[in-house]
Image (spheres, rainbow, N blue to C red):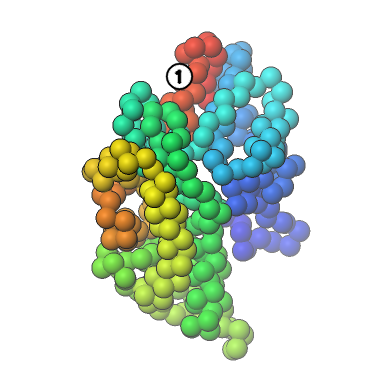
Amino acid sequence: RLLGREPLGIEVVKPVVGGVIADFDACVLMLQAFLRRAWRRHSLLRPSAAVAIPSGATAVERRAVLAAIEQCRPHLSLVPVEQTVAAALGVGADPDASAPVMVVQMGGGVTEAAAVAGMAVVRVRSIRIGGTDMDEAIVHAVKTELGLLLGHKTAERLKIRLGLAASTGAGSTSEEVIGVDPARGMMRPVTVPGDLVSHALDRIVASIIDAVDDLVSTLPPDLADDMVLPGSLWLSGGGALLPGLARRFEQATGMAVSIPDDPMHCVVTGAAAMLARAGSLHGSSAA
């Protein structure tokens, strides 16, 4: 909430950038605060935690995540899970089924497309592009085309309200915002057309669709045949809420696209389900 409006003496730190730990000490402090909330009522039980890690993370990045959590709580029982598997379970995939689903998990800094069967990743493609890149693209486009400087929170609002709606006919076509006119040194309102936002996002969305196409091209023929069935391609993560995105995916891939009721929390929901399964085997408390 303070990003872009922090007072003097306050620095806003992002512990995780691009899906990996950028500030280890800040990440530990953040996790400690979360863990204190999670086990406030279960202090007498041995806790366990599911750790959702991007499939594209390197071995070093994976070790850094686990080390940060272990430093927070040394006796914590960790259950590492693939982020895309958790997302697939979060959208409703059957953990015991052999029929595959494809999930495109779009986070703030990483987007991953994966074919998941049961609780295993069959194929995955990971790119370091996400919602933050979309915000920056909008900021750049408004500055270039309209000569106005926007904060990232305002750009995020334009992304959420307009998205790809103008190019897909899916909704609103303009939004009024207030930014800084550097030439005049003052604040002024401006109406941002939907096609400007859509064009700003085109390159990023095209990269995500290219990753999906690349993934599909590597699937075994029998799995590829299943991918054209309704409910076989799911969009999850905050990026799934982008207006017009599902229609763009359908136009580009020819696949039926579904969006869950709560795409923001698919990974959390799926990780909780995986943790519950592990907890039932080991008798530990799950959170």
Residue drawn at x 69%, y 61% is 7
Residue drawn at x 45%, y 35% is 121
Task: Determine whether 22 is above or below 277 in the image.
Answer: below
Q: Quadrant of residue 50?
A: top right
Residue drawn at x 46%, y 79% is 189
Q: Is residue 154 visible?
A: no
Q: Report the side of 24 relative to 279 (left or right).
A: right
Percent x, y of residue 153: 52, 63
Residue receiving disc 1: 277
Task: Determine whether 110 is above or below 148 in the image.
Answer: above
Residue type at tag 1: Arg
Farthest left residue? 230
Q: Is residue 272 visible?
A: yes
Farthest front residue? 221
Q: Quadrant of residue 185?
A: bottom right
Percent x, y of residue 242: 38, 58
Asked which secondary structure carries label 1, the reply is: helix
